[in-house]
Image: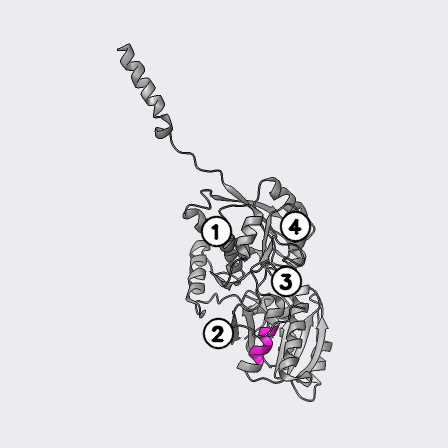
Amino acid sequence: MKRLGKAITMSLAALGCAIAPSHAADPVKVGFVMSYSGWFQPIDASSINGALLAIKEINAKGGLLGSQIEVVKFDNKSEPPLGADGAVEVIGKGAKAILFPSDFDFGAPGAFIAQQSNVVSLSGASDPKFGVTGIGPYAYSISNAAQSQGALLAEWAYKEKGWRSSYVLLDNTISFTKSLCGSFSKRWKELAGDAALAGEDTFLNGDPSVSAQVTRITSLSAKPDFVVLCSYAPGGPSAIRQLRAAGIDQPILTGESMDGDYWAGTVPNLSNFFVANYGSTYGDDPDASVNDFFKRYEAEYGQKSDTSYSIRGYSLFQAWAKAVDKAGSFDADKVSAALDSFTKEPLAIGPTTYTPQLHIQTTRPMTILQSQGGKFSAVGKFAPETVHLD
């Protein structure tokens, strides 16, 4: 009996590795160095939620390379310099990739730290400098460049609407609005001629009044066919209210910085307003997969996405996950090489291309939305033909 007991004990010991429960791989950490408070918080909120939805779906399918994704958060409090502190903190906790705010000025301080630490940076910044030329080869934006958006507005107005004269009103506060209006003006003159630009004016987002600018428009002998407004809330909506109150009812065109309808109630019966964004949140986008994404977002969070920015956050981690799978590694050099091989890669946001020289989109289609009578709807998807990044 002693021998039998010993034999049984040895047999169980030999089988121990087989019958013991398997241990899952350690989680892989990603950092979110974002604005969880402060004035930039509403801009980052949708991107954060979209990214979290992507991570939840990836984890539900088994994670990446056998590991679940774990998020390490840092609040930059809407203060760009704190982004560097945030990057140091999350990298210290093992982050293999970091999500930064969708603005170069806000994201760059942390992205520089990530670059020096061989960590991939992800952002929705619309400035091409958030990439190889401005930060380094580990920095990637999912967005369409501001210059691309400006060119799109010019080509759409000229070719789709048949308009021939414009007026540019620039909120001279951030780099995005400067690039948007600058690119529009350049492309518009190429298409319609220098004389087709009836005037250009500037203001600052915090200006309580744009009465002087409004007077210059109303004083024109020939009114423009449309106005290009490069701004963001709250200054942008304030400018629209003043334009409309002065009887300037011409169509107003703008880029992604005025995406969403959260501010539209401040402009009664908003009409003849057109904005380029990343997809209609109203269920009528020409791309069925975009509509499907926003349905999943609403089901997850119990409310409609405030802006289309959520699809950017989602697509950033969708892209990173695809690159990690392709590389078979979380190593930044290998993941970067995989991302740089993307050629019209199908992502929720649309076909996405990266090269070793350019980590932002220039010709990917964008959705143009209109507001008529205070109600938003999709007009269609359009892509620019000629884009100048200089």
Q: Residue at x 69, y 83 (%)?
A: 194
Looking at numbered disc 4 in the image, what kind of residue is underneath it? Gly
Counting from the top left corner in percent of width and height, residue 365 is at 52, 69
State the image quarter where residue 45 is shown: bottom right
Dot placed on the residue nearer the N-terminal end, 1 or 2: 1
Q: CA distance from mark 3 to mark 1?
A: 25 Å
State the SS at label 1.
helix
Q: CA distance from mark 3 to mark 2?
A: 25 Å
Q: How many numbered circles does the render carry? A: 4
Counting from the top left corner in percent of width and height, residue 2 is at 29, 10
* Quarter containing the N terminus: top left
Mark 3 Cα shell of 10 Å, populated few (<14), some (14-19), many (≥20): many
Looking at numbered disc 3 in the image, what kind of residue is underneath it? Pro
Mark 4 Cα shell of 10 Å, populated few (<14), some (14-19), many (≥20): many
Q: Which residue is mark 2?
A: 380
Dot placed on the residue nearer the N-terminal end, 3 or 1: 3
State whether residue 62 is above or below residue 288: above
Whether 9 is among the magenta residues is no
Looking at numbered disc 2 in the image, what kind of residue is underneath it? Gly
Looking at numbered disc 1 in the image, what kind of residue is underneath it? Lys
